[in-house]
Image (tube, rainbow, N blue to C red):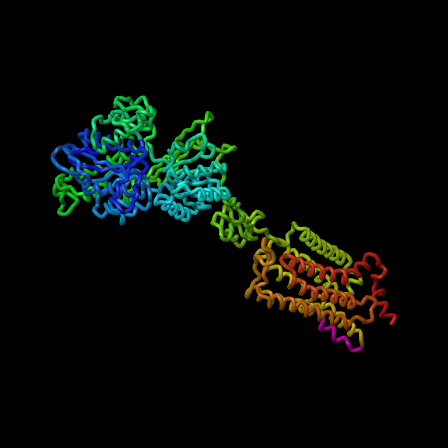
Amino acid sequence: MQNSGDVILGGMFPVHLYTSVPDLSFTSEPQQPTCQGFYVLGFKLVQTMVFAINEINRNSNLLPNVTLGYTVYDNCVNLGIGFRGALSLASGRERQIILDNTCVGNPPVLAIVGDSSSTSSIAVSNILGSYRVPMVSYFATCSCLSDRQKYPSFFRTIPSDAFQVRAMIHILKHFGWTWAGLLISDDDYGLHAARSFQSELSLSGEGCLAYIEVLPWEKNADEFRRIVNVMRKSTARVVIVFAYESRVINLMEEVVRQNLTGLQWMASEAWTAATVLQTPQLMPYLGGTLAIAIRQGEIPGLREFLLQIRPILHHNSSYGNSMVNQFWEFTFQCRFSPAPLGWAEGGGALCTGQEELENVNTEYLDISTLRTEYNVYKAVYALAYSLDDMLRCKPGRGPFSGNSCATLQMLEPWQLVYYLERVNFTTPFGDQVSFDENGDVLPIYDVMNWLWLPDGSTKVQHVGEVKRSAFQGQELILDEEKIFWNFESKKAPRSVCSESCPPGTRMVRKKGEPKCCFDCIPCSEGKVTNKSNSLECTSCPEDFWSNPQRDQCVPKSAEFLSYHDPLGICLTATSLLGTFICAIVLGIFIYHRSTPIIRANNSELSFQLLLSLKLCFLCSLLFIGRPRLWTCQLRHATFGISFVLCVSCILVKTMVVLAVFKASKPGGGASLKWFGAMQQRGTVLVLTSVQAAICTTWLVSSSPVPHKNTQYHNDKIVYECAVGSTVGFAVLLGYIGLLAFLSFLIAFLARNLPDSFNEAKLITISMLIFCAVWVAFVPVYVSSPGNYADAVEVFAILASSFGLLITLFGPKCYIILLRPELNTKKAIMGHVTES
């Protein structure tokens, strides 16, 4: 089809679906291939281009004083025919067509609207791109065509498959489908879609492909059987198909034969509107299909224009006339005269040219879903606006060398490419049209749903859209309440290889399988993850530990010898009991201080000893409760000084007993002058001062401090007092042990002195108990963990204190309270008198 004009636009459309290729025997000149199978929708695209050009020619504001013409070729869905037609458009060489009786031949076109398939567009653009002839496709979606180095003059009004792939991944993510199968056609359209899918899924990490299968060109039953078996065995419930409807038809025949149901199909734009698949036989399988569709638009006045078509009744060899007449014959199932042999005899009708299109139910007049037609319309207008911008250029302000402008008389295709790259207009429907740096239009897709109605009829309804804006990026809008799901649950299916790992577990991928297939391993102790599908578990901070669910870190429980624990309560009660007993004994001694048994055993040292024992009992309280700096510093110092004071009193008392005995011997009176009251007090003070000096040095040089120990228990913090200096602690204990050993040694030597109440024996026993307790304390203390070390030390303090209290003061209290007859000087000295 053609029409003259000041500027000629070319067009490539699939008006026929099949090609009859003659036998190439190479023994005679081959015949040209013939096109068969009239395609009404392809012819409708041709008419849409003609309508747009006529509308532009009537518009006084767009391309004033310039008439657009057109030359349109049928590519017959054949690469060779389409390639030859595109070259003819660009070079002007084809069979002669007389135009206006002024020139012979088909003049070159300025730009081409087409081609329909990606493969044809790739082949043609490889050639036309070298000459910068602009080509605006309305249906070629292969992402490979966005390569500006290979295809510098290619543009399209349909989004690239790269965006369609991202749109599908957006839908997969929306419904949580991370496990899907992919079926593709064995051509550029399918292979590049598969490559884009793998790349986008790898980058986004939103899902995996369970399988990728290539649908063969031929109707290979064995291959389709193998592919359907793969789909049946796979756990993926979602199947994405990037193929043309002819391939899907062959696939569905095998799906029906094997009765493969329970799948959620996702259709690429190539077969979204395929009515041949929307049949009662296939809808039990394809019902609920989610499909990506080309943006639907409105073209006012198109239907009226389509109704104006009329056949050419007189014989004319023009292929354009033949195209119209073939449409008429196809629509009304008639033949123009002369009819083929046997047509009339077989009852076939003859076309009159007076048939009414409005009385026929044909897709040709259906303008309810203008998708591909809308892309053709936008492509023609994009070329028209670019040409208009180019012709409005003011001389001296142009974009070309020397600030020149293009002129209608010397127009070059590459000049139009410059303006196409910058075109920007809005259609009457409200869509903005512009091309990015790759020649791609601002992408927008409709999301469709195949609805299976109760009466058995089908409907493809609009349920959302996917678009990309300069400000918000890619955006998916879905009306989920309108979506029909072809499942018993009437809900979206689940399609995952492995269920999400809950918080508290980490993913471990299965060897040799995609990353979406994994096992969930619980986090180890001390590690958590509060996210689903986490690859790693995070270690908790030092003062925290994992809860039983391993999904959050909780503060570690604090452990120390507490006043609220049963052990702490017992030790506290024992300490207070010992203090109370000391107070009672002190009261008894004060009340009976004038009695012989108290006076005979140095009452002042006894009082000091009782006071020091009270300090020993009370100092154990410093070991109970949460360790703090002051308690850590005081506990050992108080303990060391208290016990040195206690042992010093015992040592001095023992020495006094020995001195008194020697003084009773002839010539031994001089020994008492070294153990007078002042000397006794001084000795106790000096011995205690040594321990005070040791404690002071220890606290100044390396003071004990609170310490949070996490070595004993992973989930607990043991609060303890670090001794700071082990040497200081050892010296403190060693000094106490030295004094205790001296007391024991002296008392042991004086144990057999002749006296009815020889205190040396009691001191010997008390020191024996004292030393035994503290000798046993050291290894037990070192091996006891955490708060048990404090409990061991408190126990040693209390045991040794009670040992001293009972052995030294128990017998005296017994005599004072229960045997007062023995509390006389005669009774005490009786043994001496008898001897």
Instruction: Estimate the x, y position of residue 297 in percent, counting from the top left.
Output: 31, 31
Locate the N terminus and report the quarter of the image it occupies: top left
Who is closer to the viewer here, 55 or 826?
Answer: 55
Q: Is residue 396 visible?
A: yes
- Residue 672 lies within the magenta run: yes
Who is closer to the viewer here, 508 or 263?
Answer: 263
Locate residue 161: give its quadrant: top left
Q: Is residue 611 visible?
A: no
**Magenta-colored span:** 666-675
Q: Would you say the magenta stretch is mainly helix, strand or loop?
A: helix
Instruction: Estimate the x, y position of residue 187 in percent, counting from the top left.
Output: 35, 45
Q: Residue at x 56, y 53 (%)?
A: 524
- Total numbered labels placed on residues in the image: 0
Q: Residue at x 76, y 68 (%)?
A: 764
Q: Is residue 277 left or right of residue 518?
A: left
Q: Is residue 537 left or right of residue 376?
A: right
Instruction: Estimate the x, y position of residue 341 in percent, counting from the top left.
Output: 29, 29
- Residue 374 lies within the magenta run: no
